[in-house]
Amino acid sequence: MDERQAAEEAYRFLRRHTTGDLRFDERFRLLRYVIGPDGRLVAPVMFAMLEASDTVLFVPEDMDNAMELLVSLTEFDPEGEHGALTDRWRIYHGDPEDIYWAFIHVDAARYEGQVVDGEELIQANPLAGDEARLCRQINENHRAELRQVCWVIAQAEVENPMLVGVDRLGFDVRRRFDVLRVDAPQPMTTAADAELVLGQMIEQAVSAAPNHDAEG
């Protein structure tokens, strides 16, 4: 695998998750994050995390095959210009336990034996401007079909799915306790791409599981 492929696979892996174990100095704690429109990771954090001299994020958890991210945290004011990012986090995860908010800057990553420059993992979402509309359209008009997509394509039973994120590689669906990633069959760079792919996935799911109870 060359460097470009390694970076793309690492980015795809990071996008598939929204949680990790953060090691800050000698302590560990679960960190729930979201990826903002500009590609930066955002999370509510403890003050001790902001003060730590050594911070490593293991995605999705501290285990042998985890992605290891060497990160640095920068606090931001949730009442300031980045306040919309805290709303995004709440849509994904609910109410936060911690009161401080931070950008999680990725300095470098280790994934499947490859070292990836952190800059390669910070990619702006080309669908950011249309994301809210696309989610609203699905959630208001196609919740039953979204449940079938989760069942058939992601192989997950989700009683009351809510589409909360769309990016070039897939879709984030909030379920009761966490967020389910549904990979897109092809990259999406425009709203038209996303609408086409969503339509195809819904058609595939409905055809494959016509008898599955899709009422959420």
Image (spheres, rainbow, N blue to C red):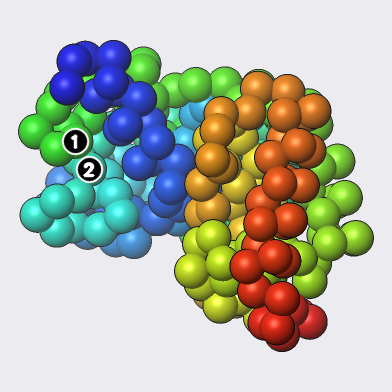
Alpha-carbon distance for marks 2 and 1?
5 Å
Quadrant in the picture for residue 68: top left
Residue drawn at point x = 43 percent, y = 47 percent = 16
Whichever of labels 2 and 1 marks the residue nearer the N terminus, that label is 2
Q: Quadrant of residue 197?
A: top right
Is 12 placed left or right of 98 in the picture? left
Label 2: how many Cα within 10 Å (few below 14, some 14–19, many 20+): many
| Residue type, mark 1 in image | Tyr
Please name whichever residue, 206 or 100, is drawn nearer the observer in this view of the structure: 206
Give the residue at mark 1.
Answer: 111
Q: Position of residue 146 (x, y in %)?
A: 72, 63
Contact? badges 2 and 1 (CB < 8 Å): yes
User: Which quadrant does the N terminus fall into?
Assistant: top left
Where does residue 112 sit, x and y in percent of width and height?
A: 14, 37
- Direction from residue 61 to residue 79 in the image, left or right: right
| Among the 4 quarters of the image, the one containing residue 212 | bottom right
On the question of residue 191 being in view, the answer is: yes
Q: At x 76% / y 37%, what residue is drawn?
A: 196
Residue 187 location, x and y as percent? 56, 29
Viewer-closest of 96 and 122: 122
